[in-house]
Structures are given as C-alpha cells and as structure tokens.
Image: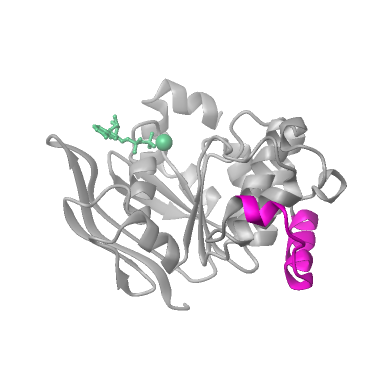
Amino acid sequence: MSKPILEIEHVTVSFDGFKALNDLNFSMSEGELRVIIGPNGAGKTTFLDVITGKVQPTLGIARFKGHNLSKRSEHAIARLGIGRKFQTPRVYLNLTPRENLELSCNRSKNVVSMLFRKPPPAERRTVGGLLETIGLDHKADIPAALLSHGEKQWLEIGMLVAQSPDLLLVDEPVAGLTDEETTKTGELLLSLAESHSIIVIEHDMEFVRQIARQVTVLHEGSVLCEGTMDEVQNDPRVIEVYLGDPNASQHAA
Ligand code: ADP
Ligand code: MG
C-alpha cells in the first residue's frame, strides 16, 4: 500500500446532540479512486464538509497528507491541495469554457485584468489540454450558458483540476444527467484518477459500477462496510440498509 493521503480517526460531528457522523474511521491511499455510497442521511455530505473544513469535528481528527485539518479554514485546506465539486455547477455562464478555465488557473489574479490579457503559452497549453480532457474543445469559445447540464458539470470538473488539487472531492456528479452523459462522466473521472486521488459520492449504482474499485458504504454516520462493488452489494448488512430506505433501494435497483 502506498501512504495514506487521507486519514479520518474517530470523527464524530454532533448537531445539537444528533450525530451526523458517529466515530467514523476512514483511510485512503494516494492515487486511489474511492466511491462512497449510503442511504439518504447517512452522513456523506457531512463527511466531505469535515474534509474541506466547512464543518469542524466535535471529536476525532482528520488528516490530509499527514496535516491535522482541525482549526484550519476552508481556504487554508483548499491551499493544502483539496478541491471540491458541489452538486450544482458553479461556472460563469456569460464566459466561455476557455475563459472559465483560464480564471481557474489564475485564481489569485484580478478577474477583469485576466479577461483583457493574452494568456502566456504555457497556460494556453494547459487550458487546451483541459478542454480536450473534458471533451469541450469544440465548444471552447461559446458562452457556457449554451452548454448542456452535463457539459457544465465537465467544465466545473475541469475548473477544479485547473487548480491542481491532489485530492478531488466530487458530490453526486451524475444527478440529472442523461445516460450518455453519465457514461462520459465516468470515463472522465477514470482518466483523472490516473493522476489524482479522488473521492466520489454517488447514488446511481450503474455509474458506481462503471467507475468503482473500492467502495465505502456509510450508514448512520459510520462506515458499514468496504470492498469491491460485488462484495458490498452482496453484503447482507448493505442489502438490509438499502431495503430499509425506499428511496435508496429505488436507486440501487
Ligand atoms: P447524506 O449526504 O448522506 O444524505 P448528510 O451528511 O447531508 O447526509 O446528513 C446526515 C444527517 O445529518 C442528516 O440526518 C441531516 O439531516 C443531518 N444534518 C446535516 N447537516 C446538518 C446541520 N447543519 N444541522 C443539523 N442536522 C444536520
Ligand atoms: Mg448529501
């Protein structure tokens, strides 16, 4: 095993006494693509909130590349190399995909001056490579408002990658996408996994099967089980938890 990039030790998050995470233990290695599943309310989003510093653990420790994340701001944690993609795309709709990516490559710079300069050759190559990776090279120079929902999701994934994070956190990337877009999103994440550590949270079981190597199942704020897709799908505890949640079993079907 290579060294862990992320270690969560005995983390509990209490909201007015309710434990959204309950003595959670989790570890993943550098370079891993990990999928996290679990019924609604299992604590998946809270788990990401702890990693990004949006929520502080009530108890326990989260470590990224050996750094204790407690009491660090969200901004400081992002600078350590953690990037998060939220469920709804956050792209500038009146700018083109190319401009959106140029801005992400230069986050610290002034937005207006950025848009009125000629990007240096190295940056143009980076942006060109990203446009190709996310499959938007043919739509690089039209307003992002004209992209489909799936294309906006890919653009946002590209914007995240432009910031060169070591760990990418992706929350429900295929919600609302067509089947074809879903498959393409899987291919994109698999290609990014060649050079990044990635955590994907997802409900869509067919999609999970497409990309998953190791799967972690969360339930009531703790890890219920971990393994390959086949192992977790045949685990009686997982079957029980999903059958107990009509919404989740519908997704799992
Ligand atoms: P998931 O993403 O797996 O659906 P969440 O992490 O969003 O689950 O939520 C886990 C549980 O914690 C849910 O029961 C939710 O209602 C509760 N919860 C999440 N955030 C808060 C909050 N800020 N205050 C109170 N309860 C919360
Ligand atoms: Mg959630």
State the colouring used for the structure image: one colour
- Please provide percent x and percent y for residue 103: 63, 54
Q: In the rendered view, does 99 fall on the left or right side of 195? A: right
Task: Residue at the far left: name it.
Answer: 17
- Say which quadrant the C terminus sits in: top right
Question: Hey, which residue is sitting farthest bottom in the picture?
Answer: 2
User: Is there any visible trace of residue 223 in the rendered image?
Assistant: yes
Q: Determine the image quadrant of residue 39.
A: top left
Residue 240 sits above or below residue 188 on the image: above
Residue 200: in sight, yes or no? no
* Callout count: 0
Residue at 63% across, 38% down: 206
Relative to 60, is 99 above or below?
above
| Residue shown at 32% from the left, 48% from the top | 54
Position above or below: 124 against 142: below
Q: Is residue 32 left or right of residue 51?
A: right
Q: Nearer the viewer, residue 193 or 144?
A: 144
Name the quadrant containing residue 213.
Answer: bottom right
Q: Is residue 174 left or right of residue 231?
A: right
Q: Position of residue 217 (x, y in %)?
A: 41, 46
- Of residues 183 and 168, the one nearer the viewer is 168
Q: Is residue 68 magenta?
A: no
Q: Residue furthest top?
A: 246
Is 240 situated above or below 35?
above
Residue 123 in magenta? yes
Q: Main secondary structure of the magenta part?
A: helix
> Residue 133, position in %: x, y?
76, 57
Q: Residue at x 52, y 24 (%)?
A: 250
**Quarter holding ligand 1:** top left
Task: Name the one closer to the observer, 134 or 101.
Answer: 101
Q: Where are the magenta residues, as a range? A: 112-133
